[in-house]
Amino acid sequence: MYDIIIIGGGCAGLTAGIYAKEANKSVLILEKMGAGGQLNNIFNVTNYPGFESVNGYELAEKMHLQATRLGAEIKNEEVTQVDFSKDIKIVKTNYNEYMSKNVIIATGASARKLNVYDEENFYGRGLSYCATCDGNLFKNKTVAVVGGGNTSIDDCLYLSNIAKKIYLIHRREVFTANEKELNKVKALGKNDGVVEIKSNMIVTKLFGDNVLKQIELTNTKTNTKETIDVDGLFVAIGRKPDTELFEGMLEFTNEGFIKTNENMETSINGVYAVGDVRNTNLRQIITACADGAIAVSNIVKKK
């Protein structure tokens, strides 16, 4: 029996674990992949207080070490089933069954797909959803990045040190990314032509035999089509909340995020949701960490 079980070991889950141990609570963090979650895939974090610039993996490792040194129990197990119907919550994994008085859901969100034909077949053969994971495979090659937010811009900046040519493809003219970082990408296009921005374009087809060779772009305004040669395609068009496990139990928004109040409480007493998986106006490392701290603080107050 634990005081708190945390499902997900990203920055929100790890922060919750740290705060739980600081409050002398027994805590178990269940993470199916490596501790740190999405943070491991971020090349350069520039907006986390205290670090002018830090690699995402390094920041995740610091959080992980802090949690374990405080005594948080972390297990690499995938949660397969939960029962929130009673005061004592049951969490089942592919290996064990655990019980807890409180559960914090910190499952995050996964990459959204292009939803074009043969997308699954080209994954790992030129198509990737993580530039920092796979970018080094495309040294001195031509790649494309799809998206208009901070992730796509960060991907472009990272790839500019690796690839010889980058196409930045966005379905609109206006970007939602941080303007300062966006201007860096635009400067790369003006100064040496490394980046070429293709606005009002979406990817509609993928071509290649064993590996990706070309992509078809369709103009969202004129419906005209264009085919460009690429060695790699990096998709950064947002994330889908990982909530399938909790369908039919908790209240969701229309977009599929878990509804919470300001204390991170869900529609079930004793169940909390933190980080990218919940309804929030901003999904950043610092807000995910804050969510974890708030959830534990509320649990401690309730006793």
Image (cartoon, rainbow, N blue to C red):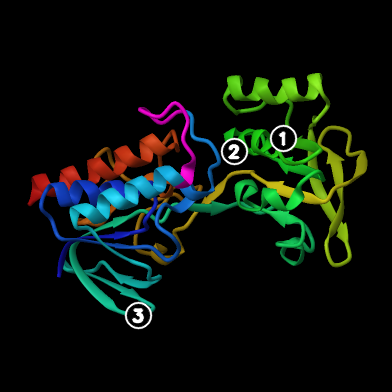
C-alpha separation, residue under disc 1 versus residue under disc 2: 14 Å
Residue 117, located in which quarter of the rendered image? bottom right
Residue 249 lies left or right of residue 152; in this view the side is left
Identify the residue shown where x is 33% and y is 40%.
289
Circles 1, 2 touching at the beta carbon (< 8 Å): no
State the residue at coordinates (88%, 39%).
223
Q: Secondary structure at mark 2?
A: helix
Mark 3, residue position: 95
Name the quadrant of the N terminus: bottom left
Residue designated by label 1 = 160
Comparing marks 3 and 1, which lies closer to the viewer? 1
SS category of the residue bearing label 1: loop
Secondary structure category for the residue under label 3: loop
- Report the residue at 92% width, 41% height from top: 226
Work out whether mark 3 precedes mark 1 in sequence or the reverse, and give the earlier one. Answer: 3
The image shows residue 120 at horizontal and vertical percentages of 72, 65
Determine whether label 2 and label 3 are within 8 Å by CB.
Answer: no
Q: In front here: 283 or 218?
A: 283
Q: Amino acid at mark 2?
A: Thr
Return the x and y of residue 21 as percentages of the image width and height.
Answer: 16, 52
Q: Which residues are magenta?
A: 47-57
The magenta stretch spans residue 164:
no
For image coordinates 22% across by 53% down, the residue present is 69
**Spatial separation of the CA atoms under disc 2 and disc 3:** 34 Å
- Label 2 or label 3, whichever comes before in sequence order: 3
Label 3 with label 1: CB-CB less than 8 Å: no
Is 139 left, or right, of 45 in this rendering?
Answer: right
Q: Which mark is residue 151?
A: 2
N-term mark: 1 or 2? 2
Q: Is residue 114 above or below residue 50?
A: below
List x then y, in percent, for residue 206.
84, 56
